[in-house]
Amino acid sequence: MKWSDIFPQPVGIFPYPLSFLIVPYVQNWQKHIKKLINLEFKDLPEEWKFVKYLNESEIDKALKSLDNIQEEPVKQYISSILKNIYIKNPDTQLDNLLKMFFGEILEFDTDRYDLKALQHFIKADYLIKENDTYSAVQELDNALKLIKNTSPIFQAQILLKKVKLIIQQKGVNFSTIALLEQIYNSLKNSNAKVLKAEASFNLGNAYSSLGNIQNAIKHYTEALEVYKKDKYPYMYALINNNMGLAYLSIQATDLEDHMRLAYGIQCLKNALKIFTKDKYPDEWASTSLNYANGLQYLPTANPIKNLLEAVNIYKEILNYRKQQNDEIGYARTLANLGNALAHLGKLDDAKNCLLEAKMLFSKYGMKEEKQAIDEILEEIHLVEVKGNE
């Protein structure tokens, strides 16, 4: 008996990393599948409880719950996934998954085009891990051909991974935005809220990089409707960081723009509630730098107070960058610190920071950054000349 005779559900309907799972047929499955797609586990049928346990990393409970599944091919498939992947070292999961899908998995049912598509999807992950992006995109194209018109949700997952790789290679352009909009629109009437939110997040990033801040904010806001602080803290913080940067990129010319800058600062504050120095040091350093930069230009009745706060933040980041031997990150922070010190009138300290940053930028051939330093140093020189007249 083929799986398609038992239950026609294709793989790939669950959010990654559960996307290769399948659940057996149960009565009223349409009602339950809507919840499961969004990882809502309340009142699940007993046959589907293994997904809940798996999501909670309760592997033993997940294996035991497979006794509730009557369809032997489905049970064998899920058991193989659990035993050969989840109970292994996480570092080898991808290798194990790849071996399975090019070996024993297809012995269950060779007519499953969705499983064959999943083979290519998994192989693409492996190639990405090996930094072979070109071949990974080819594998994703092969998967898309197999899954076409079969599973809009799985198709959207594959296409989203492909677009992200293209952006990584070539940057954002109107073609990649069109593909992201295509993914987003294909999911509008689906119950895949998490996948739709991921598409919104990537659209926000894409629009922001092209300077379309209004659309960027719209999509970031929509993504945050799903990526809540309590359930998805990391994504909540990341989206707030990116949305904060989008707001801060606005050239403030009127009261409304000044309000947007304040919104941007608040977004970065939201991100820093999650991205703490102890838990996410790299994210903390990056987001803190964005926050301090925003403080420098935030319209306020007391700009000195904001500048002093920014200076203290920069100094803390400098210590971290120094510990990590991150010379480029150290130089970027020094440049911003020098700028803040110049605004405070501490010109000698500012020049020391800027000259050290310039030396490091020269070392790494960063011409634009070096030129920006020269412009600030020229402004300081003009101020000093004027003060000596």
Image: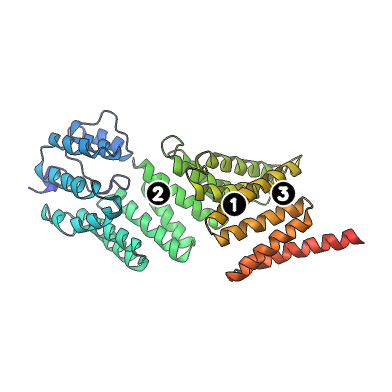
Residues at circles 1 and 2 in contact by the CB criterion of under 8 Å: no
Crowding at mark 1 (Cα within 10 Å: few <14, some 14-19, many 20+): few
Crowding at mark 2 (Cα within 10 Å: few <14, some 14-19, many 20+): some
Residue 244 at x, y percent in the picture: 57, 46
Residue 332 at x, y percent in the picture: 61, 59
Viewer-side label of 2, 3 = 3
Q: Residue type at mark 3: give it.
A: Thr
Return the residue found at the far top. Answer: 43
| 103 on left or right of 346 | left
- Residue shown at 29% from the left, 63% from the top: 139
Residue 323 at x, y percent in the picture: 54, 54
Q: Which mark is residue 185?
A: 2
Is residue 148 visible to us here?
no
Whether 132 is drawn above or below 198: the answer is below
Q: Secondary structure at mark 2?
A: helix
Residue 277 at x, y percent in the picture: 52, 44
Q: Which mark is residue 375?
A: none
Q: Which mark is residue 253?
A: 3
Q: How far apart are the two marked residues, 1 and 2, measured between alpha carbons?
A: 46 Å
Who comes first in sequence, dot 1 or dot 2?
2
Based on the displayed image, in which of its 4 quarters is residue 136 positioned?
bottom left
Who comes first in sequence, dot 2 or dot 3?
2
Q: Residue type at mark 2: give it.
A: Asn
| 247 on left or right of 18 | right
Q: Nearer the viewer, residue 116 or 319?
A: 319
| Residue under numbered circle 1 | 319
Residues at circles 1 and 3 in contact by the CB criterion of under 8 Å: no
Return the residue found at the far front. Answer: 323
